[in-house]
Image (spheres, rainbow, N blue to C red):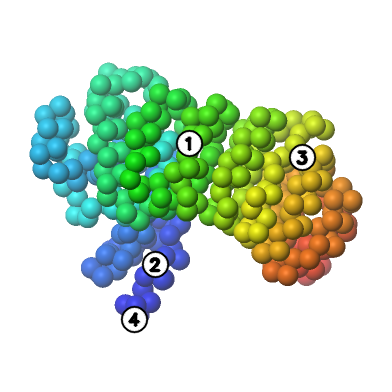
């Protein structure tokens, strides 16, 4: 295989951890090519294998500058210092996705590993603050490839982040750290976290992809998301997923009016569209729309469906519908992207 092609092949395996590990063992060229891909989002694997929690943190800390590392190791028990060997690569600089919850969760687990007297995941440990300062600083200074940021309060692994957990993150407003971000995700259970990050859109001017994954949804969430969207003028992708949504008729979803000229992908999952005719009308004005998804949504009645069916979407290539919808919009979806509607019994 020509070495110019190899990076593109390796990139196609970015979500296949096992294959990437195999690539690393081929030879030096394959190793140097696969390592940046494997370490572009290392914290994604902590949900699959919890033992990765502390390991990533120890590897990152092993790359501290000599003086900082010596000072840090002076606080570590002698029988644990072997965990902080200087790594072969400066792995931090390969980071592309900064999931703050995953990082903090990993730090907490690392502190537990270094002191087994810490029994509960939510307990604070003196080492935790020190580790967090070093890790956040390493990421802030060295992660020049960073383009994705996820703000979350938990990922089902036992710890809920609160405002105090995010205070060390506020100092990244200065400099160019947040200006690199192209993808911004909020995956939260509690709307109060929005208030903590009300400043963020002003410091992430280059965001193109915006995602909200919420446990519940109410009117204040709608106005907050609308406000966030209004601060960006060039959003290409907007995704909204609600995990536990009540079937209230008055549910009003956020407006995308400020981004109708830039949006190319719109995804709504588990949303109630019944009283959202204005939103559907806004979608019909997205002339650059390429991909549209309504996944497990309700309330997409025939009058709203007709607005979409008769709209002019010159670039639309994909309409994906999961759930129970009227025949008219299902047939429309089939006419645009039949691959999502093939009935295996008809094959």
Q: Which of marks 3 and 1 is in front?
A: 1
Few, some or many residues within 10 Å of mark 4 (<14, 14–19, 20+): few
Vertical comparison of 27 with 301: above or below: below
Q: Earlier in the sequence, mark 2 or mark 4?
A: 4
Within 10 Å of disc 1 (Cα), the crowding (few <14, some 14-19, many 20+) is few
Q: Position of residue 168 (x, y in %)?
A: 34, 31
- Give the residue pinned by disc 4: 2
Residue to which mark 2 is pinned: 10
User: Looking at the image, is mark 1 or mark 4 nearer the viewer?
Assistant: 1
Q: Residues within 10 Å of mark 2 (few under 14, many from 20)?
A: many
Image coordinates for residue 120, horizontal then vertical, percent: 38, 20
Q: State the quadrant of the C terminus.
A: bottom right
Q: Determine which of the numbered discs, if any, sits on residue 199 in the image.
A: 1
- Of labels 1 and 4, earlier in sequence is 4
Which callout, 3 or 2, points to the residue nearer the camera?
3
Image-based side of 208 in relation to 89, left or right: right
- Judge whether residue 156 can be spotted in this image: no
Judged by depth in the image, the label closer to the viewer, 1 or 2, is 1
C-alpha span from label 3 to label 1: 29 Å
Near-viewer residue (225 or 337): 225
The Cα atoms of the two marked residues, 3 and 4, are separated by: 51 Å
Query: Going 65% across and 50% down the picture, which residue do you hit?
Result: 258
Instruction: Report how far apart the C-alphas of labels 3 and 2 lie in the structure.
Output: 40 Å
- Which residue is at 34% across, 78% downward? 4
Q: In this view, does 218 lie above or below 5?
A: above
What label does residue 272 carry, if any? 3
Label 1, secondary structure: give it: loop
* Sequence-earlier tag: 3 or 1: 1
């Amino acid at each position: 295989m020509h070495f110019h092609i190899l990076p593109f092949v390796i990139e196609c395996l970015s979500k296949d951890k096992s294959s990437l590990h195999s690539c690393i063992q081929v030879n030096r060229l394959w190793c140097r090519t696969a390592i940046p891909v494997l370490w572009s989002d290392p914290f994604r694997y902590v949900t699959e294998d919890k033992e990765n929690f502390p390991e990533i943190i120890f590897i990152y800390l092993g790359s501290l500058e000599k003086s900082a590392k010596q000072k840090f190791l002076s606080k570590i028990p002698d029988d644990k210092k072997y965990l902080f060997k200087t790594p072969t690569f400066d792995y931090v600089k390969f980071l592309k996705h900064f999931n703050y919850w995953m990082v903090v969760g990993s730090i907490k687990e690392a502190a537990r590993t270094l002191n087994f007297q810490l029994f509960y995941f939510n307990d604070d440990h003196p080492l935790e603050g020190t580790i967090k300062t070093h890790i956040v600083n390493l990421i802030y200074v060295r992660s020049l490839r960073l383009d994705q940021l996820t703000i979350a309060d938990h990922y089902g692994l036992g710890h809920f982040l609160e405002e105090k957990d995010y205070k060390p993150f506020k100092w990244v407003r200065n400099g160019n750290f947040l200006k690199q971000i192209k993808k911004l995700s909020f995956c939260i259970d509690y709307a109060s976290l929005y208030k903590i990050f009300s400043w963020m859109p002003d410091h992430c001017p280059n965001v193109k992809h915006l995602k909200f994954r919420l446990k519940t949804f109410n009117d204040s969430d709608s106005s907050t998301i609308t406000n966030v969207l209004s601060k960006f003028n060039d959003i290409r992708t907007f995704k909204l997923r609600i995990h536990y949504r009540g079937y209230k008729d008055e549910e009003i979803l956020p407006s995308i009016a400020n981004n109708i000229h830039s949006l190319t992908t719109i995804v709504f999952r588990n949303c109630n569209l019944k009283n959202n005719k204005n939103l559907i009308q806004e979608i019909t004005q997205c002339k650059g729309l390429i991909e549209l998804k309504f996944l497990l949504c309700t309330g997409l009645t025939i009058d709203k469906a007709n607005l979409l069916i008769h709209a002019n979407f010159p670039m639309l290539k994909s309409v994906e519908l999961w759930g129970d919808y009227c025949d008219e919009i299902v047939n429309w979806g089939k006419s645009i992207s039949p691959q999502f509607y093939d009935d295996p019994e008809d094959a």
